[in-house]
Image (spheres, rainbow, N blue to C red):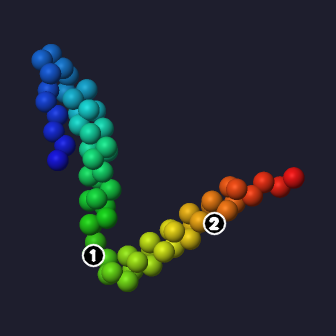
Amino acid sequence: MALVRIKEGESFESAFRRFKKSCEKAGILSEVKKREHFEKKSVRLKKKSISARKRALKKVRKSFTPD
């Protein structure tokens, strides 16, 4: 839970900016987007394996340096 205490003499805009930053750090928005629609376990696992393959491919491409 993101909580921001407004300091004395602080404008609403700066407090709101701090609140948005704390939400970003806590990962609240990404969690909301993830839970927006129900996803079957098989679909979730498939996405996870696809992203793992992409990471591995990226790692291989990054380590390969043509001479």
Q: Secondary structure at mark 1?
A: loop
Q: Residues within 10 Å of mark 1 (few under 14, many from 20)?
A: few
> 10 or 40: nearer the eye?
40
Q: Nearer the viewer, residue 58 or 2?
A: 58
Label 1 sits on residue: 38
Left or right placement of residue 9 versus residue 21 in this view? left
> In the image, residue 55 lies at what x, y percent?
56, 63
- Determine the image quadrant of residue 20: top left
Real-space CA distance between mark 2 and mark 1, rounded to the nearest whole angstrom: 29 Å
Contact check, label 2 and label 1, Cβ < 8 Å:
no
Q: Is residue 64 above or below residue 51?
A: above
**Residue at screen point 50% across, 68% down:** 51
19 shown above or below 26:
above
The disc labelled 1 sits on which kind of residue? Phe
Q: In percent of the image, x 48 and y 74: which residue is there?
A: 49
Type of the residue with mark 2: Leu
Earlier residue among tags 2 and 1: 1
In the rendering, which numbered label is found on residue 14? none
Mark 2 residue crowding within 10 angstroms, few (<14) / some (14–19) / many (20+): few
Residue shown at 31%/64% (left/top)? 34
The extreme top residue here reads: 9
Per the image, the residue denoted by label 2 is: 57
Circle 2 or circle 1, nearest the eye:
2
Q: Is residue 43 left or right of residue 61?
A: left
Q: Residue 53's x, y, as percent?
A: 56, 71
Between 63 and 15, the one lying in front of the other is 63
Residue 4 vertical placement versus 49 (above, below)? above
Q: Quadrant of residue 56?
A: bottom right
| Residue 41: x %, y % from top left | 33, 81
Say which residue appears at 26% left-offset and 39% top-offset. 22
Q: Secondary structure at mark 2?
A: helix
